[in-house]
Amino acid sequence: MTRYLRVLTHVGEVVDRVPAGRWNSPSPCEGWTCLHVLGHIIDGQRQIGSLLSGQGPREPMADPAGAVAGEPVAAWAAAFRSVREQLSTTDPSRRVPSPHGEVTADWVLATAVIEPLVHTWDLAQAAGVEATLDAEAVGACLAAIEPMADQFSATGMYAPALATSAAATPEQRLLALLGRKAG
């Protein structure tokens, strides 16, 4: 839970620095703008909330930009408050229904952290702002994804993995595994 909240806090830091004129800028996610990426992150938090509340899986929004409702900074602030409040009363060992069967709330957050983590980078790239991803979260995700990177691209949610140099940082390696070229 601590890692998940730390990653979401970083999303907010990037959202606060997006220049007003950049919300419609294209992102590294094909066909998506900053608004789409942020909407996807917000919708993801609604999906996590549904899982953690015991309601089970919830379908993603067809148009993620719709989650932003016109004011991106305020929409993110409301979504973050909601998640933070829910996590403050969630028992990490509570078992909840998921697409993977019944799992713990902690498992949901540990596996879901990849989305806001990587999309923070996507948002920063589209907005033209600097962002360094949470090193501990990057390490945890890298350890989990490296052995099965091909499975991630096979879902169609991520581009095929890119090659990296021996000097690549963990952040660059994680992003490359998910089809993103980090400088």
Image (cartoon, rainbow, N blue to C red):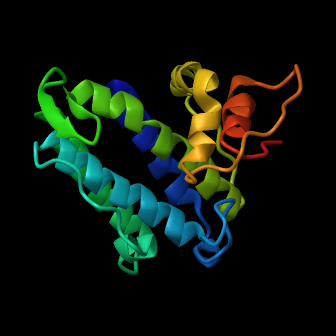
Q: Name the one closer to the observer, 76 or 17.
A: 76
Seen from the viewer's position, the closer of residues 62 and 5 is 62
Q: Quadrant of residue 124?
A: bottom right
Residue furthest to the bottom in view is 70
28 relative position to 163: left or right: left
The residue that appears at 21% across and 52% down in the rendered structure is 82
Residue 59: image location, x then y, percent: 29, 61
What's the residue at 10%, 34% (across, down)? 89
Residue 144 placement (x, y as % from top left): 53, 22
- Where in the figure is residue 162, as x and y percent of width and height? 79, 39
Where in the figure is residue 133, as x and y percent of width and height? 60, 35
Please name the residue shown 71% across and 45% down the image: 160
Q: Residue at x 78, y 42 (%)?
A: 182
Q: Is residue 145 left or right of residue 75?
A: right
105 horizontally vs 115: left or right? left
Quadrant placement of the N terminus: top left
Between 156 and 35, the residue placed more toward the observer is 156
Query: Eyeballing the image, is 77 above or below 3?
Result: below
Give above or below for 57 relative to 5: below
